[in-house]
């Protein structure tokens, strides 16, 4: 993959993460492990421009909804599950944190609905892990990337380092 410059909602693919990006994407990976979803684990960490963590979220059922057999029933699960990005935005709102000007670190490319939420919340940059998005989600990812670009949100896929 080639690197592209980032300006006005451009996409950069394959670059190396800086220290803060690495810290927050690794935190998003940790947060993803909290998901009870047996098939897919996604994490999101949102940080402000001063590198303070504002919120985190993982894909899972809403608060108060039991993590039970419904997790194994795809049709039901898809209707109940809250995506990591939406959970992170909700957590920020619940705790009184504005997200305008913040960066979202997500383990996979956001879906179009989550991209819309990130845009509406005032996120200015989204960082994901290069090559982590499952192939069957790529069409949705392309739509989300186009939305982010049109809205002027930077989107970066960076390589993880050990």
Image (cartoon, rainbow, N blue to C red):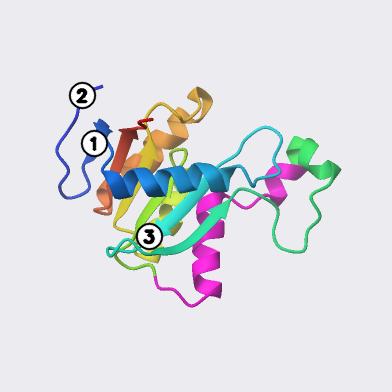
**Residue 94, position in %: x, y?**
56, 74
Mark-to-mark CA distance, 1 and 2: 8 Å
Q: Earlier in the sequence, mark 2 or mark 3?
A: 2
> What residue sits 24% from the left and 38% below the top?
11
Q: Which mark is residue 73?
A: none
Task: Pinpoint residue 56: horizontal percent, then vertical percent.
Answer: 51, 57
Which range is magenta?
76-98
Q: Residues within 10 Å of mark 2 (few under 14, many from 20)?
A: few
What residue does disc 2 label?
2
Left or right: residue 118 versus residue 60 is left
Determine the main secondary structure of the stretch shown in magenta.
helix
The spot of residue 127 in percent (x, y) is 35, 44
Earlier-in-chain disc, 3 versus 1: 1
User: What is the CA distance from the residue labelled 3 to the residue labelled 1?
Assistant: 19 Å
Examine the rendering and report whether any part of residue 36 can be seen: yes
Q: Is residue 119 above or below residue 41?
A: below
Q: Where's the C terminus, which quadrant?
A: top left
Query: How much space separates mark 2 and mark 3, taking CA atoms?
Result: 26 Å
Indicate the quadrant where residue 120 lies: bottom left
Q: Is residue 106 magenta?
A: no
Pointer 1 residue: 12
**Where is 100 relative to 17, above or below?**
below
Q: In this rendering, which labeled residue sits more in front, label 2 or label 3?
A: 3
Q: Quadrant of the N terminus?
A: top left
Quarter of the image for residue 77 reads top right
Q: For numbered disc 1, what is the local secondary structure?
A: strand
Compared to residue 107, the image places residue 131 above or below, namely: above
Q: Which residue is mark 3?
A: 47
Q: Are marks 2 and 3 in contact (CB under 8 Å)?
A: no
Q: Residue furthest bottom?
A: 96
Horizontal relation, residue 99 to residue 3: left or right:
right
């Amino acid at each position: 993959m080639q690197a592209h410059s980032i300006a006005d909602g451009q996409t950069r693919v394959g670059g190396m993460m800086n220290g803060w990006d690495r810290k927050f994407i690794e935190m998003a990976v940790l947060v993803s492990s909290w998901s009870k979803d047996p098939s897919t684990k996604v994490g999101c960490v949102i940080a402000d421009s001063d590198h303070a963590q504002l919120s985190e979220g993982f894909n899972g059922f809403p608060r108060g909804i039991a993590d039970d057999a419904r997790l194994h029933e795809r049709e039901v699960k898809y209707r109940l599950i809250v995506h990591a990005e939406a959970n992170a935005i909700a957590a920020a709102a619940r705790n009184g944190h504005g997200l305008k000007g913040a960066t979202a670190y997500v383990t996979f490319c956001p879906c179009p609905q989550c991209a819309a939420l990130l845009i509406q919340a005032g996120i200015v940059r989204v960082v994901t892990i290069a090559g982590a998005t499952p192939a069957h989600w790529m069409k949705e990812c392309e739509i989300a990337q186009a939305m982010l670009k049109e809205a002027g949100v930077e989107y970066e896929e960076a390589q993880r380092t050990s």
